[in-house]
Image (cartoon, rainbow, N blue to C red):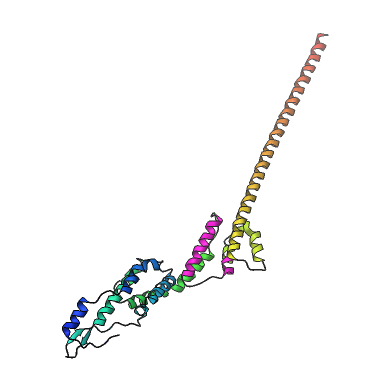
Amino acid sequence: MAASVTSSSSDVSKDTSYEVSIPPQLKFFMSNLKTMVTVQLTTDNHLIWKSQLLKLFTANNYEGYLTGDIPKPPKQLLSSDGSVIINPQYSTWMLIDQHLASAIYSTVSASLLPYILNLESTHHIWATLELRLQSTHRSRLLQLKSELHQLQLGDKTMLQYLTDIKAKIDIIAASGSSIDTEDIILYTLNGLPATYQSFKAVIRNQLQPISLDDFYALLCSEELHIASEVGCDATAASNTDSNYALTASKGTYHSRASSYRGQSSSRGSARTTTGRSASSRGG
């Protein structure tokens, strides 16, 4: 990009010092960056962030600053009379490059900024983030899949459980990997308790594949069915306990009544016997 300059030193100095201005295209790029890049770079979403930023830079013809295809021109040139002059292309390149670098800074999370704050160019920032985040990509991906495999329904509602699963899947997708629908269904079934055993057997024995939307709808319907059965069982158990208590109470009453009647009969017999003895003595 560098070119020789044949004008005088004073003319070049005047052009580079006072007439280098921000191109209109760069102004548009900077003003619309925050609305076009919808995610902030973290260790979990590098590929999504990279894709959005690269497309935006390419659309505005600035991708060469990211990839290094537009290298930095020499800062000084020799004029025709042998004097050292400032390269105007260097000034223009620096103006654009530093604005692009600040644009990248605005899309990077605070935890990653210390790794790029002292870098000089847009290309160095881009390459450093690429290297930094790819080095932890595989281990992070394995950790996310392990967390997905260990998710359990527990005491959560089915909606909360499915939301947790979807969040893990979205993070894995943002990390540049994907999970098959069958694997997602398998992970989801593995986290269900024993009360869903019959449901799990039906899903696993299906010959035709099922979509995630249909699978999630069936899970929510099964949750309501199981809750209804549990409620009916609780009601039946409560009625059984009440009947048992009533029967036991009646048995106790009849036992006491029989005992009371037995005691009354004994007393009557005793009185009759006493009366007869008294009559015998009186006669």
The main secondary structure of the magenta stretch is: helix
Residue found at the far top of this picture: 283
Q: Position of residue 43 (x, y in %)?
A: 41, 69
Image quadrant containing the C terminus: top right
Judging depth in this view, the residue of 128 and 140 nearest the camera is 128
- Residue 218 part of the magenta-drawn span: no
Query: Taking the image as drawn, is residue 8 in sight?
Result: yes
Residue depicted at x 38% and y 66%: 35
- Residue 176 part of the magenta-drawn span: yes
Task: Name the quadrant containing residue 211.
Answer: bottom right
* Number of disc labels: 0
Task: Name the quadrant containing residue 223.
Answer: bottom right
Image quadrant containing the N terminus: bottom left
Q: Position of residue 191 (x, y in %)?
A: 57, 61
Image check: 136 left or right of 152? left
Query: Taking the image as drawn, is residue 40 in sight?
Result: no
Judging depth in this view, the residue of 25 and 92 nearest the camera is 25
What's the magenta region?
156-185
* Residue 127 vertical position relative to residue 41 in the rendered view, above or below: below
Image check: 4 left or right of 243? left
Residue found at the far front of this picture: 24
Q: Position of residue 230 (x, y in %)?
A: 63, 50
Residue depicted at x 77% and y 17%: 271
Image check: 153 left or right of 31? right
Q: Position of residue 108 (x, y in %)?
A: 36, 68
